[in-house]
Amino acid sequence: MNTQLLLIQVFNGLVNGAFYALLSLGLAVIFGMLRIVNFMHGALYMLGAFAAFALGQVAGLGFWPALILAPLLVGALGMLLERGLLSRLYGLDPSYNLLLTFGLTLLTQDLVKQVMLGRFEVSSAPYTTPAALTGVVNLGFVVFPKYRLFVIALSLAVCLLTWFVIEKTRVGSVIRASTENPTVTRAFGIDVGRWVTGVFGVGVALAGLAGVLAAPIYSVEPYMGAELIITTFAVVVIGGMGSILGSVVTGFAVGVLAAVGAAVYPPIANTLVFILMALVLLFRPSGLFGLPEGAR
Amino acid sequence: MTALPFKPARTDRERLRRAAWLAGLGLLLLVLPRLIYPVLALDILAWGLFAVAFDLLFGFSGLLSFGHAAFWGTSAYVTAYLLSHGQGVPAALLGGTLSALVLAVPIGFLSVRSAGIYFSMITLAFAQMLSFLAQQWTDVTGGENGLQGFARPDLLGLDFSDAVTRYYFSLAVFAVGFLLAYRAVRSPFGQAQQAVRDNEPRAQSVGYNPLRFKFTAFLISAALAGLAGSLYTFGHGVVSLEVVNWRTSGEVVMMTLLGGTGTLFGPVIGAGLVLLLRDILTTANLPVGIVTGLVFVLVVLFFRRGVVGTVQHWTRGRPR
């Protein structure tokens, strides 16, 4: 394999990795703080892509407003779900959250399919990226589409910002306190329930954002989140469940490794992440960045 | 429920109740192919046994496997492969079951070390690996097309081209599998299994090795899921990629929950209800995914005891 091909694969891997990172970051925020395993994350990613299509294309708002509005809409929907449904299961085994969100996934996917059926062909509609992001960039050693570079950059920026807010700011410490010790935090006069809903909303909005970014690259269809979410779960296990840093680093790393692996031996592309996961589990069951089981 | 230091003798009433459940379920399954069309009845047997296998792990060990499609699917493919390569029905069923058992050794070894939600994610990921393998290995699995049209040679004068004959043969196999699970749960092993589920440190301090119990339970569950997958192939005559899809893993959870976890009778009834519902929806041309998704959500939110669990709760009148 020559160097140029390798570099192209690395960049393609970074694009995929950008999506893995955004999605697993959302899952990590939600799991790490609320102990909710959100199986619905893939369906919300899909809703983000549909919202971007509906707002940007059908309603004619264009890419930039959709980039802001669609994640907000998905985040708001997430907050409704948390208040209305998930909050009823707190105090029970986390398995029930997994099961509830699994049911909601089936429901959402088929609902979208029914609503979209025959209305408009989403996947074949030309999705216009804004003029500023069309075309290619010559990086000297490789020529790469501008939009994909934008995806990598934005994902990195959002991931860094999320990490910074949670680990380094006062808001982050309130969130961590609310989720780690609700009773004491409540005694300080902080409305824990509101923070929990907010955190869930933010985590879900990250999935929505990934969906918006995916809309111009992948075909927008009701089941687009189904396979992706499973890969993302594997990324989360490799990185260490609930680890913010682990989810981001592993997300990008898995994207690159899978793309490079696929160039060497194509059938391995989709399986590599699960092989990695098995290896990590064998030697470091709590994940690369996770704390050992006793420390949780 | 607080664990008692000794097991109280089972009362006659309870024994009677169990016998009634067993007789009721047996009778229902005996007349089933007269009530609904035989292939649907066959499906209920296969999925029912699958759900029982899943419940052995979830209801009695507290391990929520989200990747049981791996065992069901692998066995389904192996059974189809053996049948299409001229093997008889007993060899195909046995081969399928054994393949699931062999697969469960590494998967179980790696996954039972994790508990709770971690266990669910790990089993899910392993099942996904197999799902991708099934997609790639088209020579053996037929890829998107699946496998069909394999022979089911006669056995002891039974003509398996007749669906009703296939049903009653499958019912016999089902009964063996069900009673095995029933015995396992009521054996000292099953009691220890539940002790580990209820209070792992205490069980350990009494001298049980929790990991070994979980691993053994995993193997038994996987082998039974394999037997169920074998029956599915035998009854249906078709295997497609659907058998290793994560939806399949989710569906068996739903059947078990709807029927009642930790009850053994529940999963069979749950499987029956889900399949009948799906059949009605498909015939009426209604959106299956929306309704099953909704049922799933409602069961998790408001009906966690399931059908049999609720009945038991009312008749026993004890809080749990």
Image (cartoon, coloured by chain):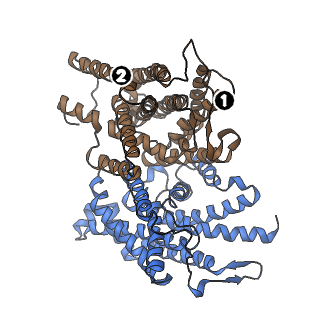
Chain colours: A blue, B brown
CA distance separating discs 2 and 1? 31 Å
* Residue located 56% across and 27% down the image: B97
Report whether A66 appears left or right of A269: left
Whether residue A98 is visible to the viewer of this picture, yes or no, is no
Image quadrant holding the N terminus of chain B, namely: top left
Q: Which mark is residue B31?
A: 2
Q: Secondary structure under badge 1?
A: helix
User: Dividing the picture into quarters, in which one does residue B84 lie?
Assistant: top right
Question: Residue under circle 1?
Answer: B84
B105 is higher (above) or lower (below) than A252: above
How would you rate the neighbour count of disc 1 (Cα within 10 Å): few for under 14, some for 14-19, many for 20 or more?
A: some
User: Dividing the picture into quarters, in which one does residue B85 lie?
Assistant: top right
Report whether B201 appears left or right of A150: left
Residue B287 image offset from top left, x and y in percent: 39, 52
How would you rate the neighbour count of disc 2 (Cα within 10 Å): few for under 14, some for 14-19, many for 20 or more?
A: few
B80 is higher (above) or lower (below) than A199: above
Amino acid beneath label 1? Ser
Residue B41 image offset from top left, x and y in percent: 42, 29
User: Dividing the picture into quarters, in which one does residue A127 lie?
Assistant: bottom right
Chain at tag 1:
B
A91 is higher (above) or lower (below) than A183: above
